[in-house]
Amino acid sequence: MKKRRHASPKTVRIGMVGVGGRGTFLMKTLLAIPGVTVNAVADRSRDNALRAQGIVKEKSGTEPALYVGGQSHFEKLCAREDLDAVVCGGPWEIHVPVSVAAMRHGKYAATEVPAATTVEECWDLVRTSERTGMPCMMLENVCYFQNVLTVLRMVRENCFGELIHFEAGYQHDVRMTKISKEGTLKWRGGHSLNKDGNLYPTHQIGPIAQWNNINRGDRFTYLTSMSSKARGIQDYARKLLGPRHPLSRRTYKLGDVNCSLIKCAGGATVTLYHDTNLPRPYDLIFRCQGVKGLYMGTVDGVYLDGVSPEHHKYEPFAPYLKKYVHPLWKSLEREAKKNGGHGGCDYITLYDFVRAVRNRTQTPIDVYDSATWSVITPLSVESVKKGSAPVAFPDFTRGKWRTRKPIPVRGL
Ligand SMILES: NC(=O)c1ccc[n+]([C@@H]2O[C@H](COP(=O)([O-])OP(=O)(O)OC[C@H]3O[C@@H](n4cnc5c(N)ncnc54)[C@H](O)[C@@H]3O)[C@@H](O)[C@H]2O)c1
């Protein structure tokens, strides 16, 4: 039998900025996607940049250009003619400068989470994307989790009926990313010193926003936020470094458990947790509840009125994962599990981004989503500061949320 020849996919040329832990991982995953090349790498650290250059050379045989240093270096990378997109895997403070520089130079921008940390930064992204016509996608990989996309399909097929309430949490013990064994405060720990609120909201809110058509028929109107006292980081520092170490004697402003409530224009409500300073198992919760039943991620169970066999009892979700498999997972599961972290969802996230770049279409998570999900940080900080006063969400779409179409359940 004659072999069918497939046209090779049009090459998508990437520039990477920030190749520490996560950036290197994104870069390796990108290199596993057919038709992707990494032509340039920038990092403030020469060692990290050289390591990334070596990885690209080993995997693809070509040597990417290197840019070592701060702002002017990633600016130069973004100005290169031989790039279609710039992917930022650096710390939070460079996400907006890098994305804005990329769009100004006519490149697709992709950034790690959160896309921005202040209201003004969110508007910067929106205005730059509108002015340049270049998309900006926050790489919110939790939107591509297998259970999250299965629930999206179930929502679209009306399994839960009209949606009423959602709950999710970034409940992840990341104390080791805040304070090092050597006794230094890491950049992520620095954010816990002076800010109290939900500092990492996008993993929780992204899936909920897609299920509930936020910016696409509905919108978040306001939130109110409250934080517990702060003990976890100091306690961790004491155990790790001893009670006399300066980091053990510092006070950290970030309350150990922050809880925010969000109201949607359509009437649904959301509870969000941020819980990163205490010893605990990982749990994103993910409750999606409608008039006909709910999915509950903590127990990975589903209850559907008149369908589930036992009254008042969750059914296991596994059969639903098969019945309502999302087409992206159906097509990409094998490659994704082989090449991507977080159970394969990193590969699918980047695949979806690369596809948009290749086809010159809007990114599946666009600049309005990136801004709306990220702005929860400054809004929650403001609410906590004002004794849990309600704080209004900016409408980054300027009214377009009324007519924008919901995210479809879309295959390859
Ligand atoms: N989506 C996810 O599942 C996930 C998981 C982990 C981390 N993250 C995100 O990834 C990002 C990076 O986190 P990390 O843990 O890899 O951090 P990291 O500290 O390991 O890496 C950051 C890298 O950025 C470089 N850098 C710092 N300032 C720079 C500048 N001005 N110009 C160029 N490079 C610069 C550093 O030298 C380092 O190589 C964060 O935004 C984090 O929130 C996302």
Image (cartoon, rainbow, N blue to C red):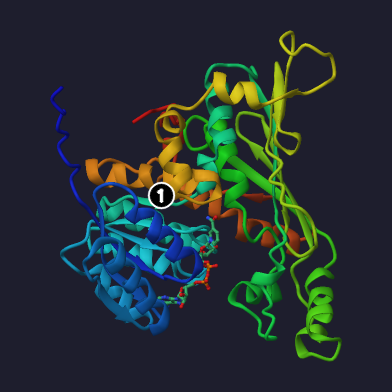
Q: Position of residue 140 (x, y in %)?
A: 50, 49
Foreground pick, 129 / 84: 84
Amino acid marked by disc 1:
Val
Question: Where, quadrant-wise, is the N terminus in this rendering?
Answer: top left
Residue 172's quadrant in the figure? Answer: bottom right
Percent x, y for residue 144? 50, 40
Q: Nearer the viewer, residue 384 or 213?
A: 213
Label 1 packing within 10 angstroms: few (<14), some (14-19), many (20+): many
In the foreground, 205 or 131: 205
| Residue located farthest toward the top when viewing the structure as drawn | 306
Q: Residue at x 58, y 16 (%)?
A: 158
Q: Quadrant of residue 242?
A: bottom right
Q: Nearer the viewer, residue 132 or 178?
A: 178
In this rendering, the answer to whether 377 lies above or below 361 is: below
Mark 1 lies on residue:
367
Q: Residue at x 72, y 66 (%)?
A: 196
